[in-house]
Amino acid sequence: MRSLILAALLALGLVPAASKADTHYTPVATQYLAVLGDKTATSGTGAESWGIWTVDPGPRGVRLSSFDALLAAGGKAPAGWSMDPQDWWLEEHGLIMESPTFPVPPGRYVVTGGREIQAVLTVEAADASGAQAWSLDSGATIYDVTHLRCRAARYTPLDAGQSCSAKSVNPGFFPMEIGTAMPVVDGCRQLDYQVLIIVGMVTDD
């Protein structure tokens, strides 16, 4: 991930303020959202399938070349998190990273992709069916607030009992260029998540 770069941009005032939240939000230590959905959408449902990293998972990741050592340690990474070998995450540098926390707590998040637009993302509480609605203000789309250099893919077995191993990933694929699709892994079902950066929480209107 890019927390150090983002911190520098924030310090220099190069990340623009949210139009409706610039005087009403509390800055937070950089967090990340793993988001599924139509990148052109400004609102919708399905936020119950989104995850959140409250700590940058990139520096806490494990290189693919260390996968055997990770398994030998029972899936316990040096940073203290545990990998499920049948439900694992990969980022744009080829690091196996910890899973985000599901679901995203309801709230109003100030999000950015570190580009031109910053917006308020509202995540509603789950309804009776467990579904969570979401919306972005100021006409922003998911793409507008996606950090394009950050990538996150989740891999699980295609079928019960089938092998879905990070051992099958070619380390030479990384680091990735913007716009490159995350690698397909034999035996795995793959979900590619868009990554949004959280820089604050709205505290009032």
Image (cartoon, helix red, strand yellow):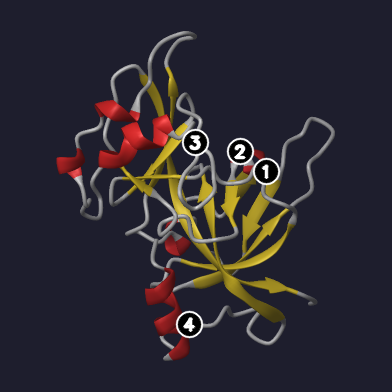
Spot occupied by residue 41 in the image (x, y as percentages of width and height)? 51, 50
Q: Earlier in the sequence, mark 2 or mark 3?
A: 2
Q: For the residues labelled 3 and 1, say whether their Cβ atoms are less than 8 Å apart.
A: no
User: Marks 1 and 4, Cα distance to the nearest angstrom?
Assistant: 28 Å
Indicate the amino acid at tag 3: Met
Q: Which residue is mark 3?
A: 83
Residue projecting furthest to the bottom: 12
Choose the circle earlier in sequence order: 3 or 1.
Answer: 3
Q: Mark 2 — residue?
A: 49
Residue, disc 1: 103
Q: Earlier in the sequence, mark 4 or mark 2?
A: 4
Circle nearer the viewer, 1 or 4: 1
Between marks 2 and 3, how big is the CA–CA gap?
Answer: 19 Å
In the image, 10 versus 119, the foreground residue is 10
- Tell me the amino acid under the disc marked 2: Ser
Instruction: State whether residue 39 appears in this view.
Output: no
Q: CA distance from mark 3 to mark 1?
A: 18 Å
